[in-house]
Image (cartoon, rainbow, N blue to C red):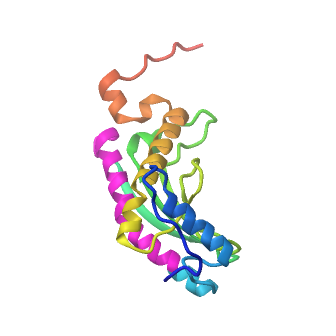
Amino acid sequence: MRHPVDVTMHNGSGLREEDLMRHLADLVAHSYEGATSWPDRLNVFRRAVELLDPVVRGVLAEANATFLGNTGEITRRSVEQDDGSVGEHWELSWPRQREAVSRDGGPVAPVQVIAWFRRSFNHAHVRGSTAGDWPLQVTSIRDATRQLPIIRAIVEAELHQRIYEGRYPVMPVAVRKYGLPPAEPAP
């Protein structure tokens, strides 16, 4: 779909200008990549998710190989809220994370990349469970590939959060390199 508002493309600055300009154009036009009705905007979101899927899975697989010794499992699930808002959750979980107890005594969540589209919004976003919101301006393979640095940043932030929550032994690479921490003496 073509935007009703002219957008400026990447100027070589390194910023993701194209995504932000398309995001701004959506806000001005009250649309999502040119789509104005909820069903049409939802179709844009669903196509964006399918195009983004191999990028997200690739980054999660890279994290699994690099930090988890290929012990992780990548899953994707859909979420729909009562108001019609929708989301797609990609998750990377692994045995040490599932067994860990967080600093607050609860479970340590898996690494998450979340594409979400609130019914009351013009357009969708991508985020982690703890890291920001970026515009989800994806209508082509080229657009999806351009999200690679953002997806990597989300996954890195998610991994860091899991290290904080579950302490370093949650990461197989850390246990291999540094060993387990010494047992604390009984009180």
- Residue at 65%, 74% in the rendered image: 122
Specify whether 87 is left or right of 95.
right
Name above or below for residue 139 compared with residue 159: below
| Residue 55 on the magenta span | yes
Specify whether 183 is left or right of 54.
right
| Residue 122 on the magenta span | no
Name above or below for residue 159 compared with residue 177: below
- The stretch in magenta equals 44-70
- Residue closer to the observer: 68 or 107: 68
- Residue at 39%, 71% in the rendered image: 51
- Residue closer to the observer: 113 or 33: 33
| Prevalent SS, magenta region | helix
Residue 77 in sight from this viewpoint: yes
Q: Quadrant of residue 117?
A: bottom right
- Residue at 52%, 75% in the rendered image: 45
Residue 71 in sight from this viewpoint: no
In the rendered view of the protein, which quadrant contains the C terminus? top right
Q: How many marks?
A: 0
Query: Whole-percent x and y of residue 121?
Result: 68, 71
Specify whether 15 is left or right of 67.
right
- Residue closer to the observer: 115 or 153: 153
Name above or below for residue 40 compared with residue 72: below
- Residue at 32%, 52% in the rendered image: 61
Query: Whole-percent x and y of residue 42?
Result: 56, 80
Query: Whole-percent x and y of residue 107?
Result: 55, 43
Query: Whole-percent x and y of residue 68?
Result: 33, 41
